[in-house]
Image (cartoon, rainbow, N blue to C red):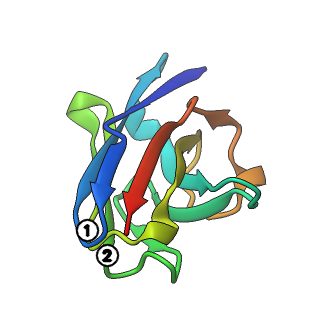
Amino acid sequence: QVRLMESGGGSVQAGGSLSVSCAVSAQSSASDYSMAWFRQAPGKEREGIACIDRFENSLYADSVKGRFTISRDNAKSTVFLQMNNLKPEDTAVYYCAARFANWRSLVSRDYKNWGPGTQVTVSA
């Protein structure tokens, strides 16, 4: 069983940076979980944008590659998403997700555990 809680969302102008965090509360250890960030804009499907496995290997969607960086600090049971050069089309609710496995996937149905989300708004 794992509980996830995102934080750090907010509003920023285009070209700016923002970092969101996901606190992982697990009965075992946060390091046992592969983690991912998804986002969902109004009227759009949920999109997988970044994931990181137990060994810190990462995978990115083309839409964010080179601008976003996923990382994890298992000692602090936290996963981060650093977002640079933000664009208005990055506006969405950002969710973290977890799976008890060594895994890299940007497909939402591959994850069983989700946080409630945090809003990121990028203005032109």
Residue 82 in view in this figure:
no
Q: Residue 100, percent across and down? A: 59, 39
Residue behind mark 2: 67
Viewer-closest of 44 and 107: 44
At numbered mark 1, what does the secondary structure look like: helix, strand or loop?
loop
Residue at 47 percent across and 21 percent down: it is 26
Residue at 51 percent across and 83 percent down: it is 62
On screen, residue 96 above or below 92: above
Residue 51 in view in this figure:
yes
Residue contact at pointers 2 and 1, CB within 8 angstroms: yes
* Sequence-earlier tag: 2 or 1: 2
**Number of marks in the image?**
2
**Cα distance in 3D space between marks 2 and 1:** 5 Å
Q: Residue 21, percent across and down? A: 33, 39
Viewer-closest of 37 and 57: 37
Q: Residue 88, percent across and down? A: 45, 68
The image quarter containing residue 24 is top left
Viewer-closest of 45 and 62: 45
The image quarter containing residue 79 is top left
Residue at 36 percent across and 58 percent down: it is 55
Left/right of residue 6 with respect to residue 95 in the rendered view:
left
Instruction: Please tell me the numbered disc located at residue 84.
Output: 1
